[in-house]
Image: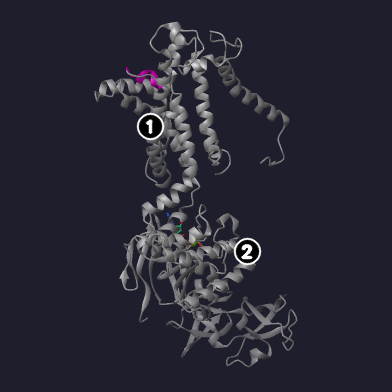
Amino acid sequence: MSEERGLGMPVVFRFGAIVALSFLIVPMLIIVLAGLTAGGYLKFPPEGLSLRWVLAFLGLGPGSYVASTGAAGATTVFIRAFGFSFLLAALSTLASLALGTMAALTLTRHDFPGRAFIQSFFLSPLMLPGIVIGLALFIFYRAAGLGLSRSFTGLLIGHIIICTPFVIRTVSASLYNFDLSLEEAARSLGASPLQTFRQITLPLIMPGITAGSIFSFIVSFGQFDVTVFLAIPEQQTLPLTIFDHLRFHSDPIPAAAGIFAIVLVIVSLLVTARSGDLKAFAGFGKT
Amino acid sequence: MSHAGLELADVHKRYHAVQAVRGVSLTVGQGEFFSLLGPSGCGKTTTLRMIAGFAQPSSGRIVLDGQDITALPPEKRNLGMVFQNYAIFPHMRVFDNIAFGLQVRKGESASTAQKVKASLEQVGLAGYEDRYPRQLSGGEQQRVALARALVVEPKLLLLDEPLSALDKRLREEMKYWIKDLQSRLGITTVYVTHDQSEAMTLSDRIAVMNKGRVEQLGPPREIYEQPATRFVSGFIGESNMLEGRVTALEGQQAVVALGDTQVRARVLRPVQVGQSVTVMVRPENVVLGAAAGTLAWPAPIGQIIGEIYQGAIIRYEIQLPGNVKLIAESHNTSEREVFPVRANVPAGWSADSGVVLIE
Ligand SMILES: Nc1ncnc2c1ncn2[C@@H]1O[C@H](COP(=O)(O)OP(=O)(O)OP(=O)(O)O)[C@@H](O)[C@H]1O
Ligand SMILES: [Mg+2]
């Protein structure tokens, strides 16, 4: 649909849009190209193109990284980190969806003293630097002595704290212009509160929920600064693994990992774009 | 009322500082078309929402078919409700919208499709099953909303300003259509509106509400011809409201002095000589000239100070002695008497069509 709306805008604005887009896309292109280099170092422009490092990341292919370092399966380190980040992101997303949706319902549907305060409190992780949240949790876990320190649960809680505000935001947005008489109509037709929620409310706020899950997943998957404080001994996340690797090595394997992360995000966006939820995700137009 | 459909007993509702409904008591008979009529903010919707179970009365009781439903949740009340904005489920086809009530009650069954079909036929929308709400016009959405409410065979049909979102033409058409459907089904109906002509046309009885109270309750004719209060007579139709003092009482009539002018009107509630009252007369009941001369009481002489031509109706503005202004309307028939502006003519009304109002 290339329908023109309004009277159009000054040419300068379009130029600005192109500049902004370039800033978003160029780094991704550089990562992708760097990961596809035929040479042995992480640099740009690449020295010829090949799938060498992509295959190496997957633990396949000749002249692989494993041999050159001698470390037992450095590539599997990346694969495992990728898998771990995926699992962490999936669990954080599920938990944030449940918590965030309930919080959004309460915050938009009920009026109680201090609501505005609680609302901004729930959204504060969006505003606070990750370092602050990470440090706070780090100290809290140590002090609380609940065994959360350096545990998977502790890490997961950290990610849920980061992700939930995104769900609250997107779900609240779809609840703000929700017509309450739809629920009342359902109730008067004989539907219980639960039936009403499942058959009327939930389908209608689905765009917000989908948008919230995309946000949440991407944020958790790429999370770095909070994770640094909560890292656990058994397994590192992908961003931490990339960071560690860059400190001691100069090969392009992190770029290859980056390619996979980018592909993962693009695929998840494409899958949901079809349902039209992407507009709500980006905050464009109504759902 | 032998077999009462719905009864409200001294129902109150307060929202924090706002007293939305202050002691409404009324009874709606089986099969009756009952309207709640009143200006914006008088508590009509709140009353309806308490009947539907969306709002809980602060005090008072609501009884349906002999059962106290005050504390029942909406889904247990077996009522059909049509909302002002229709509240059609936007993510469901017309079929699923109408089937919703059947499906949540008993689950999908063989008879569902049949019932939906019959109900669509009833509202004149056969073949609309697969449309989505956004593909329907306002009038069609309204019919779907009605079909959806009626298909579950509710004990009571509640309608909150169902016509206000439609344009004037469609509103007129739907008004008669709803009336016809209601009387064919014989379903007890409570209809909320701020449009007095809607309430008049549709209702068996009307409760006129003001500031959370019922000011008058009765059939349209009684409300119009024998308003109980100044508010009711001012809200329903047009009226002359003449301030005066009772000078004498003669049976069912009072003689009221409006300054220097003596007029007569019916007494519906006890008044005393000397009491300040308002005499209410509908413009169409004011007669002029020769017709005024034949009244049973001496009509005062007034001066025509204005004339407005409205096609079927001519409106005169008349000044009675003592600076009392009176509006008269007469049908523009060929045999009507013509009064030039500034002419002095007798102006009066049959004593029974004037009403003495105290409140
Ligand atoms: N949920 C609520 N919270 C607070 N006050 C309310 C609420 N609902 C209604 N009111 C107040 O109660 C009063 C009556 O409202 P109601 O909606 O019943 O009026 P209405 O007669 O339906 O008016 P309208 O013709 O404008 O729809 C109003 O003063 C309104 O502001
Ligand atoms: Mg209302």
Find out whether residue A229 is within the magenta segment.
yes
A122 and B356: which is toward the camera: A122
How would you rate the neighbour count of disc 2 (Cα within 10 Å): few for under 14, some for 14-19, many for 20 or more? Answer: few
Residue closest to the eye, B166 or A119: B166
Q: Would the CB of label 1 be found within 8 Å of ligand 1?
A: no
Residue B345 lies left or right of residue B19; in this view the side is right
User: Mark 2 or mark 1: which is in front?
Assistant: 1
**Looking at the image, residue A279 lies above or below residue A14:** below
Judge the density around disc 1: few (<14), some (14-19), many (≥20) Cα neighbours within 10 Å. Answer: some
Query: Is residue B354 found left or right of A158 in the rendered image?
Result: right
Dot 1 falls on a residue whose secondary structure is helix
Residue type at numbered disc 1: Leu
Q: Which residue is mark 2?
A: B167
Query: On screen, A33 above or below B27?
Result: above
The circle drawn on residue A223 is none
Task: For marks 2 and 1, give the CA distance.
Answer: 52 Å
Question: Disc 2 vs disc 1: Cβ atoms closer than 8 Å?
Answer: no
Picture quadrant of residue A14: top right
Q: Is residue B262 left or right of residue B75?
A: right
Q: Position of residue B113 (x, y in %)?
A: 47, 64
Rendered position, A151 above or below B264: above
Residue A175 seen anywhere in this rendered image of the structure:
no
Expressed as whole percent of the image width and height from the top left, the position of residue A119 reads 41, 37
The residue wearing badge 1 is A91
The residue segment tinted magenta is A226-233
Q: What amino acid type should be assigned to the residue bearing mark 2?
A: Asp
Q: Position of residue B345 (x, y in %)?
A: 69, 85
Residue found 43% across the figure and 33% down from its top: A165
